[in-house]
Image (cartoon, rainbow, N blue to C red):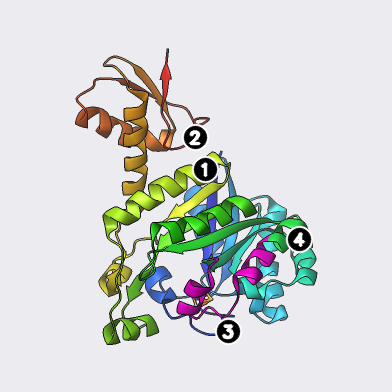
Amino acid sequence: MKRYIIPFFLNFQGCPHRCIYCDQTAISGEAHTEVSSVIEMFLKYHGTEEYCAEVAFFGGTFSLLPVEKQEDLINQVIPYIKKGVVNGIRFSTRPDAVCKKRLSWYKENHILHIELGVQSFQASYLDMLKRGYSPEKARESVRLIQQSGLSVGVQLMLGFPGQTREDFFKDIDEIIRLHPHDCRLYPLSVIRGTPLEREFQNGSMNFISLGTAVDWVVDASELIESEGIEIRRIGLPHTPDLEEKIVAGLYHPSFADKVRFERLKRAFDKADAATGATLIVHPADLQYTYRICRMKKKSCQVMPDPSVRRSTILIQR
Ligand code: SF4
């Protein structure tokens, strides 16, 4: 069954301050105003399919909105949950905006999943980003959400100025230890008009290259998925507005494709498939696999199977 997220963008609402790298308008466009119109738009295009869908309050700090505002947003989704056309609600927030008491209220009020913008579990990078919480707080919030019975996703950044591969993998090890339901990996980009841009223009910041970032994320995503943690997204969503505003740092509109392609290429080499072999891959990897077969000049049959883990290749014997 297809899974959909119906995003409702809050654009900074609830945020205690603007994080130095963040420009929600460039990433998500203008803030949404009516929950019902976002859901109705979704239903217009997907209402006749067999699906599972959650409304997601993204782009701000949902759990720091005034309680009445949180209730109002949730109440706007409830009629659709009762009709059975929406399965539940998720939201994104910061680690320092997670409160144990409130979590049980969320659970009783159709929240299924919380996405935590952790960014890093290392104090030096959290300080650099001026996030305002400690690595301990980030770990504690992940655990609190897990203990509440809600599912948790962790957003992690890479490509901080001066970051080494070893540093990045310390954060990946932390993800594996905490074992959230899923995670997002995205490189730090300098967006025009943000405080980070001013720091970038005033000083010297060395960012890792695109090739290095792809290499790190290929290995990290392999490790994470092999532990049964889902990778929800790689890279920032691509919008022409965002692309036009990138000043420095790591940004590529097809960053995720590059990572998936490289992983499959490595899997293909490892499988050492002979011409004529039948390769079984996840349906989302079909096109990448055809491309690799052409590149390697091997004529193989490629079969889709949704039970196969992404970026892996099985050979039918
Ligand atoms: S990164 Fe998150 S918490 Fe920070 S300003 Fe952006 S939306 Fe708000």
Q: Which residues are magenta?
A: 121-142
Secondary structure, mark 4, is helix
Q: Are marks 2 and 3 in contact (CB under 8 Å)?
A: no
Label 4: which residue? Answer: 107
Please identify the quadrant where the N terminus is shown.
top right
> Is 130 within the magenta?
yes
Q: Secondary structure at mark 1?
A: helix
- The amino acid type of the residue labelled 2 equals Arg
Precedes in sequence: disc 4 or disc 3: 3
State the image coordinates of residue 44 (x, y, percent, origin top left): 49, 53
Q: Is residue 263 magenta?
A: no
Q: Amino acid at mark 3?
A: Pro
Q: Residue at the spot x=30%, y=71% of the render? A: 241
95 lies left or right of 48: right
For disc 3, the marked residue is 16
Q: Distance from label 2 to label 3 (Cα)?
A: 39 Å
Other residues around mark 3 within 10 Å, as few (<14) / some (14–19) / many (≥20): some
Q: Residues within 10 Å of mark 1 (few under 14, many from 20)?
A: some
**Position of 288 relative to 193 (above/below):** above
Judge from the rendering whether residue 311 lies leftward or rightward of residue 276; answer left or right. Answer: right
- Identify which residue is drawn at 32% across, 42% down: 262
Mark closer to the chain start, 4 or 1 = 4
Mark 4 or 3: in front is 3
Q: Residue at x 31, y 80 (%)?
A: 192
Q: Which residue is mark 2?
A: 309
State how far apart marks 1 and 3 are (Cα): 33 Å
**Residue under pointer 1:** 225
Residue placed most toward the observer, 53 or 34: 53
